[in-house]
Image: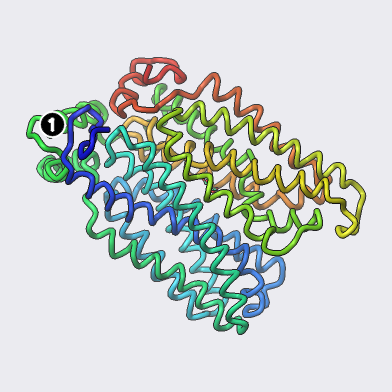
Amino acid sequence: MAAGHMQMSNGSAVSGEYKKIVYWICTIAALGGLLFGLDQGFIANSLETIEKVYFLGVEGGEKYAAILATGGIIGALLSGIFARFLGRKRSLILAGFLFSSLSIVSATLPAIAVLSACRFGLGFAVGIASFIVPLYLSETAPASIRGSMGSLFQLMITIGIFLIAVTNVVIARIFLNPHVALPIMFLVIAAFSLIMFIGSFRLPESPRWLMLKGRKAQAREVLARVLCHDEDIDRELADIDNAIKSDKGAGVGIIFKGYFFKVLLMGVILQMFQQLVGINMMIYYAPTIFGYAGMKGLLAMLTVPTVNMLFTFPAIKLVEKWGRKKLLYVGAVVMMITMIAAGLAFASIGGISDPSQIGGLPKAVLLIAVIIYIFGFAVSWGPVAWIVCSEVFPLEGREVGMTITTIVNWSFAGLVMGNALSFMRDHGNASIFFVFAAFCVVSMLFLKFFVPETKGVTLEKLESDLKSGKALRDLGN
Ligand code: BGC
């Protein structure tokens, strides 16, 4: 990338001003990712405080935690409609509003029914954000940095998970009165939500959405803030126009078109595997799992969110350098090996019922395996599954495609969260690690035969390849 210039998806040079807009877009839109992480990571280290205020018991606490996923599924379900009718920008504003108002209401420590409704609503906002942010970024970012922006979204999720893990631990230790600590925990989320809410008013609308709505003059205005020359603007407009002309206004019915169904199935399976490799067992239950192996304290509480965040940074470069598919392969191999190692560590612990009797070796193997496993996910499947899903769908079906794939992601996340610990209890602690390792193996076969490399390919080229009947794995070649 030349200094002061970037390449638009059609190869046009763009002005330095674009950079400022791009960074603004990144900052505000990616705050959606941060809030995703803050809300998802909230429970792990706040449940004890919640318990002291609300006396929910184990089942009540679980219900309160899980209602986020239900809200997420419904938010994701409706977000395609919001994206299409409200536009990308106003949907982001809506998510920002929900994040802010609902975390402020939660901070007043209302009755449990209201608190739960707020968490459902936060999940709803997360569902919207997890759909709209990658979509918005993929439509507004130049092709050369599109992948990095998608990784930025993932990076913000992991920063959110990390930040809330740390702040909740610190808040609980400083403010011993839970009636003081809990509101402060919610207000941390509220503060970030307000920045997103207010900042998103200044975002430009996606030129692709404006064109989809036939608002060419406005699309031109946005592009004029981005590109130096009139001919570049015209070319970009023509590119978008060509892509949408054929099936403008396609609704859910697009699912039944062969070329779309094919790519939809690919996206669905990709998001399914993103969860079936077991990541959320680690994100939600690592402290519990470490506890089974006799490890407790800050190490057990903070290792996973820290490693997850740190290793998402290299992903931003790698996703453009190595490409999406190679990273997914590497991630699957690393996760398979480490899951097997963690499983063997638990198998060797076997029948020891007193965790304090567990030797140093299995503990060390488990800890190292978990660290490398999280590394493997963070540099690959974490960002790349979202990036690929934001890139592969033809424009007129992008909302439908991303809605369905996001719902699949949430549903399988719920499946893992809702069953991982009971599976370990019923089938032995080691068992679940081998199950996840097996899913890693199957995911590699799926990658080999069905997943295209989308690095550096314009969205328009992917679309025309898809419609011309090319095999999925050859799209963009
Ligand atoms: C996944 C989440 C997961 C997070 C961890 C995301 O890409 O979709 O389910 O909790 O990564 O960083």
Residue 365, image quadrant:
top right
Camera-nearest residue between 297 and 256 = 297
Task: Write the residue at 42% across / 58% down.
Answer: 125
The number of callouts visible is 1
Counting from the top left corner in percent of width and height, residue 141 is at 28, 40
Colour setup of the view: rainbow
Q: What element carries label 1?
A: helix
Task: Write the residue at 62% across / 80% down.
Answer: 53
Counting from the top left corner in percent of width and height, residue 376 is at 59, 38
Counting from the top left corner in percent of width and height, residue 388 is at 43, 33
Work out whether 98 lies above or below 322: below
Task: Write the residue at 90% across / 59% down.
Answer: 354
- Residue tagged 1: 232
Residue 208, image quadrant:
top left
User: Callout 1 environment at 10 Å: few (<14), some (14 to 19), or many (20+)?
Assistant: many
On-image quarter of the C terminus: top left
On-image quarter of the N terminus: top left
- Please state if 341 lies on the left or on the right of 267 as rendered: right
- Please state if 9 lies on the left or on the right of 118 as rendered: left
Counting from the top left corner in percent of width and height, residue 360 is at 83, 50
Task: Write the residue at 75% across / 46% down.
Answer: 366
Camera-nearest residue between 144 and 41 = 144
Work out whether 164 lies above or below 463: below
Camera-nearest residue between 439 and 246 = 439
Disc 1 marks a residue whose amino acid type is Asp
